[in-house]
């Protein structure tokens, strides 16, 4: 069924709200703007009866339809979303409140499987029609909490683990996602549609996944708060993998508070992902308890300056000045700033490429383990070799314009992640993130946290499985010279394009990172000063009572 037909079908009963129909009400101050509304305000309206979960679902579906031809952020809608909303409304009317997010719609990245009518493809035709025996654990947790899984967001195909010549936000099945902050803007990736979808309110918030940068970077570019959790804080069971050593699932939302609500629900141990069994508690913290305006008071914050000087180029100036201003804000909030808190083995890190070996060898093993769990597998795809063969011979996969260089390299390794060569590579790679990187700097300078521009932040933490939280920091000024991506012409640097700041910590330190991020966000409120060039116009006023 085409996307347009599907929306029409999902919205049966909404026929009075046509595209050209005049607004039945002018936007009333009692209805919050869906571009920015937070969970607490959504829930207040659900509780007072000002709107229902069905209203929210209808409004978000119409908002997706308004912009998706241009932004292509959503790959599939959940045909059951309105029915689910209706039953959650009935539960609420009856006094059953499953969680703080009962009845609120979210998008999830299209590598997180659901046991319903939606496909889980990583953006590839190879997995279209494949089914799983149950929801991914994180999806099941959201569902049990009463979150409406509204649809699947587009992504850089295979979480950007396929080609040497691709573009962020492109997948064969979902086409090219673009940013809402600049025409034909690079949405970054690989959680591209999750970034764009949350940024302009195609849903209240979304889930992304990260191996190295895939939550942080699209959150940064799309003016969002993103939490990249410690590897093992959130289950990866039935999430299409790159690497069991580095993958993690986390929230992409418009405020630290919203992201903290989501993380509190999806965190926790899961027998089907044994990395989660290393969590140092039986029940994970309630991360909303970290939302403390004063939490920067007394904090020791390090700035690994060498990272910034290593990466800066002729586009970095606005980022570095905003970052330096942010350092002042934190000082004024009572933090002690430690400059030159550098990663002990930074120069070695820049020369080391063992991470590539880790990801390639992991992908061979972990992808096969995911595929082995499928209940139906229409293209009989059981290995990376099968995926590669399918991709190279299926015309819609855009081969060879988008090549399979990453897989060619992986398959030429000749080993997977059970080989001793993998362990050598993993130990070297881990070192540069841990003792030689983040953990080394935290210890050497006796710090609570490190901060960096998000563009420069993900690598060392990715290698060592450490958490990072990004918060909006600023955007490129109006006189910025546009820089487009080499082969596909997406605008990567240009006026109004947002960027973020990262709080980087030790394993399991999310409670602290969220506290610091919140105290910074509340003092700066950068998100509200950056406006998208395109956003849907449909609001609750257009659907409530209809
Ligand atoms: C309301 O709650 C009662 C008691 O738990 C249950 O029997 C009934 O089915 C519920 N109705 C709805 C609409 O959820
Ligand atoms: C999933 O893919 C199948 C096969 O192409 C398609 O028929 C179905 O409509 C898709 N599901 C959704 C929710 O789009
Ligand atoms: C993909 O999107 C581009 C615009 O970004 C459009 O020109 C093209 O027709 C789309 N391709 C498909 C297969 O829908
Ligand atoms: C963790 O789970 C994986 C896959 O289920 C399994 O191969 C591995 O042996 C397990 N490791 C431990 C330490 O239990
Ligand atoms: C908030 O943080 C400050 C500074 O760390 C601390 O003194 C205060 O007790 C915290 N408040 C709460 C409610 O935890
Ligand atoms: C920035 O540097 C690149 C080469 O590194 C150059 O092509 C480009 O023109 C420069 N842009 C500006 C605005 O100086
Ligand atoms: C991996 O690490 C080892 C040990 O430090 C080093 O000799 C080797 O060159 C590294 N390999 C790559 C691809 O960076
Ligand atoms: C998949 O395997 C089954 C059983 O061997 C076979 O019947 C079917 O034709 C295969 N499908 C494809 C697309 O190769
Ligand atoms: C590769 O794919 C083609 C076309 O789908 C198929 O005919 C062939 O058997 C496949 N080869 C292998 C080695 O899987
Ligand atoms: C943009 O304007 C600022 C402030 O006037 C100036 O410092 C900067 O050099 C300008 N940048 C460009 C690329 O023209
Ligand atoms: C990458 O794709 C672009 C767009 O199709 C093409 O112009 C370019 O030649 C490709 N580069 C390589 C190395 O394949
Ligand atoms: C929701 C949506 O717009 N999905 C589109 C994603 O991209 C594919 C391929 O171009 C379209 O067919 C879908 O309509």
Image (spheres, rainbow, N blue to C red):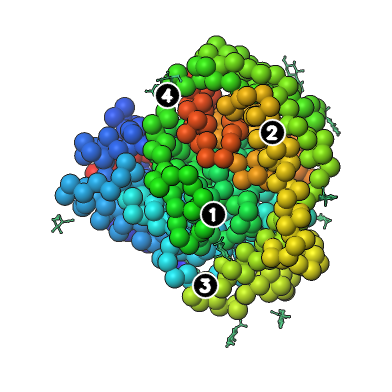
Residue 351 vs residue 282, the one in the foreground: 282
Report whether the residue tagged 4 is closer than 8 Å to ligand 5: yes
Q: Earlier in the sequence, mark 2 or mark 3?
A: 3
Secondary structure, mark 4, is loop
Counting residues from the start of the chain, the first of labels 3 and 4 encountered is 4
Give the distance between the C-alpha atoms of the residues marked 4 and 1, in whole angstroms: 30 Å
Mark 1 close to ligand 4, CB under 8 Å: yes
Sequence-wise first label, 1 or 3: 1
- Residue labelled with disc 4: 292
| Residue tagged 1 | 275
Which of discs 1 and 3 lies nearer the camera? The answer is: 1
Cα distance in 3D space between marks 1 and 3: 21 Å
In the rendered view, does 306 fall on the left or right side of 104? right
Q: Is residue 455 above or below residue 146?
A: above
For label 2, the crowd category at 10 Å Cα-Cα, with few meaning under 14, some 14 to 19 and many 20 or more, is: many
Which residue is pictured at 68% across the width and 74% down the height? 386
Say whether residue 134 is visible: yes
Q: Please report the residue visible at 30 percent of the width from the left and 45 percent of the height from the top.
A: 99
Residue 344, x across and y down, in percent:
75, 32
Residue 122 sits in quarter: bottom right
Sequence-first disc among 2 and 1: 1
Q: Position of residue 223 (x, y in %)?
A: 56, 33
Label 1 CA crowd tier, 10 Å (few <14, some 14–19, many 20+):
some
Q: Residue at x 38, y 38 (%)?
A: 286
How many residues crowd around disc 4 within 10 Å: few (fewer than 14), some, or many (20 or more)? some
**Disc 2 marks which residue?**
440
């Amino acid at each position: 069924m085409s996307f347009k037909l599907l929306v029409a079908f999902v919205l049966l009963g909404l026929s009075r709200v046509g595209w050209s129909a005049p607004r039945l009400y002018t936007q009333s101050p009692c209805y919050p703007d869906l571009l920015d509304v937070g969970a607490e305000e959504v829930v207040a309206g659900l509780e007072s009866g000002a709107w229902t979960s069905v209203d929210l679902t209808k409004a978000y579906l119409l908002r997706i339809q308004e912009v998706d031809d241009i932004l292509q952020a959503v790959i599939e809608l959940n045909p059951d979303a309105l029915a689910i909303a209706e039953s959650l409304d009935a539960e609420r009317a009856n006094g059953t409140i499953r969680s703080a997010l009962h009845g609120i719609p979210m998008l999830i990245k299209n590598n997180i499987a659901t046991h319903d009518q939606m496909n889980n493809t990583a953006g590839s035709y190879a997995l279209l029609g494949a089914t799983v025996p149950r929801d991914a654990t994180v999806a099941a947790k959201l569902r049990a909490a009463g979150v409406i899984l509204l649809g699947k967001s587009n992504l850089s195909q295979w979480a950007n683990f396929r080609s040497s010549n691709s573009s962020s936000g492109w997948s064969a099945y979902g086409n090219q996602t673009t940013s809402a902050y600049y025409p034909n803007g690079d949405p970054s990736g690989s959680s591209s549609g999750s970034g764009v979808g949350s940024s302009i309110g195609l849903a209240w918030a979304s889930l992304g996944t990260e191996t190295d940068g895939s939550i942080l970077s699209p959150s940064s570019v799309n003016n969002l708060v993103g939490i990249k959790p410690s590897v093992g804080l959130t289950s990866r069971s039935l999430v299409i993998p790159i690497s069991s050593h580095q993958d993690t699932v986390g929230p992409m939302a418009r405020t630290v508070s919203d992201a903290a609500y989501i993380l509190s629900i999806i965190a926790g141990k899961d027998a089907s992902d044994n990395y989660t069994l290393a969590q140092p508690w039986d029940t994970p913290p309630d991360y909303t308890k970290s939302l403390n305006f004063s939490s920067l008071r007394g904090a020791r914050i390090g700035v690994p300056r060498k990272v910034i000087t290593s990466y800066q180029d002729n586009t970095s100036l606005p980022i570095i000045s905003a970052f330096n201003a942010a350092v002042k804000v934190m000082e004024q909030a009572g933090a002690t700033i430690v400059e030159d808190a550098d990663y002990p083995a930074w120069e070695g890190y820049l020369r080391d490429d063992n991470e590539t070996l880790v990801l390639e060898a992991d992908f061979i093993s972990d992808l096969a383990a995911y595929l082995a769990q499928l209940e139906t597998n229409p293209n009989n795809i059981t290995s990376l070799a099968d995926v590669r063969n399918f991709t190279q011979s299926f015309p819609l996969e855009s081969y060879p314009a988008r090549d399979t260089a990453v897989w060619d390299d992986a398959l030429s390794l000749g080993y997977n992640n059970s080989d001793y060569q993998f362990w050598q590579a993993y130990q070297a790679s881990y070192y540069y993130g841990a003792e030689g990187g983040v953990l080394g700097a935290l210890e050497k300078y006796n710090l609570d946290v490190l901060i960096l521009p998000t563009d420069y932040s993900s690598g060392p933490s990715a290698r060592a499985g450490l958490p990072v939280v990004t918060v909006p920091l600023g955007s490129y000024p109006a006189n910025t010279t546009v820089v487009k991506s080499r082969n596909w012409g997406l605008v990567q640097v240009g006026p109004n394009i947002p960027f973020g700041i990262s709080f980087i910590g030790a394993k399991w330190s999310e409670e602290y990172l969220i506290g610091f991020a919140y105290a910074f966000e509340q003092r700066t409120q950068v998100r509200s000063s950056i406006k998208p060039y395109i956003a849907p116009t449909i609001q609750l006023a257009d659907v409530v009572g209809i």
